[in-house]
Amino acid sequence: MPEDLEFDNQRKNEEIIMMDRRHPWVLAKSGLVMVLAILVILLAYLFVGASLISSIVLVAGLIFMTIYGFIRWFVYSNDIYIVTNERVINIDQNSFFSRRVTEAELNNILNVSYEIKGPVKSLLNFGDISIDTSGSDKNYLVLENIENPHFVQEKIVALQKKTQTSSGSSFANKNIVLN
């Protein structure tokens, strides 16, 4: 990771280990919708003929598809996850004006698992990563459509173990006194 890379609310000594987006395949559905809509508009234009109304519909349809494509690209490019030496952060851009940021401290992580479901995800090697945490009402964080989820899962687990051993917070290293 380049050292000059930063993000909002980054802590003083926090280093970015990984930062990435969802797999590009998530744009395929939007792309297919756009191509089909433009194809239908163009076919209707060819069969109906060039009139004022059909020209207005064609231009309006192309403008709508351009706006739709921009919004889908904006959501994709702003939907990222960040793995640092202290936490995992998921910035989930749901729409143009809707963003949800979730984070899990590495020392609160209990379990990290991944799932690759379906033939397309298996062929293109992307899936979802679930991170179970302690100390919150919603005890998990899900990173959706992550490229190479096995590698990312291993990286998070290694960082989590390193954090636990360096802070001495590993359950196995604690002395428990019962009265």
Image (tube, rainbow, N blue to C red):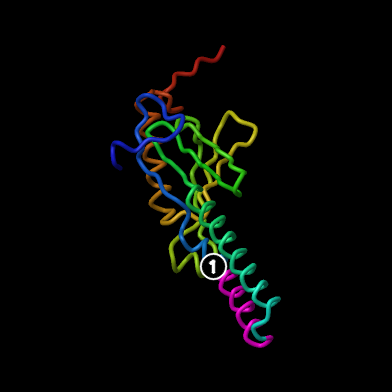
Which of 60/128 is in front? Answer: 60
The reply, left or right, for residue 88 in relation to residue 92 is left
Say whether residue 33 is magenta. Answer: yes
In the image as oriented, which residue stretches furthest toward the right? 53
In the image as oriented, which residue stretches furthest toward the front? 52
Using the image, determine if residue 142 lies above or below residue 87: below
The reply, left or right, for residue 141 in relation to residue 161 is right
User: Which stretch appears magenta?
Assistant: 32-48
Residue 122 x/y as whole percent: 47, 66
Residue 117 x/y as whole percent: 54, 62
Say whether residue 106 is magenta. Answer: no
In the image as oriented, which residue stretches furthest toward the left? 3
Residue 102 x/y as whole percent: 55, 37
Which of 153/111 is in front? Answer: 153
Q: Within 10 angstroms of label 1, few (less than 14), some, or many (20 or more) residues?
A: some
According to the picture, the residue beneath numbered tag 1 turns out to be 31
The reply, left or right, for residue 31 in relation to residue 87 is right
Using the image, determine if residue 62 lies above or below residue 113: below
Q: Could you tell me which quadrant the C terminus lies in? A: top right
The residue type indicated by label 1 comes to Gly
Q: What residue do we see at 42% from left, 35% from top?
A: 7
Q: What residue do we see at 52% from left, 62% from top?
A: 27
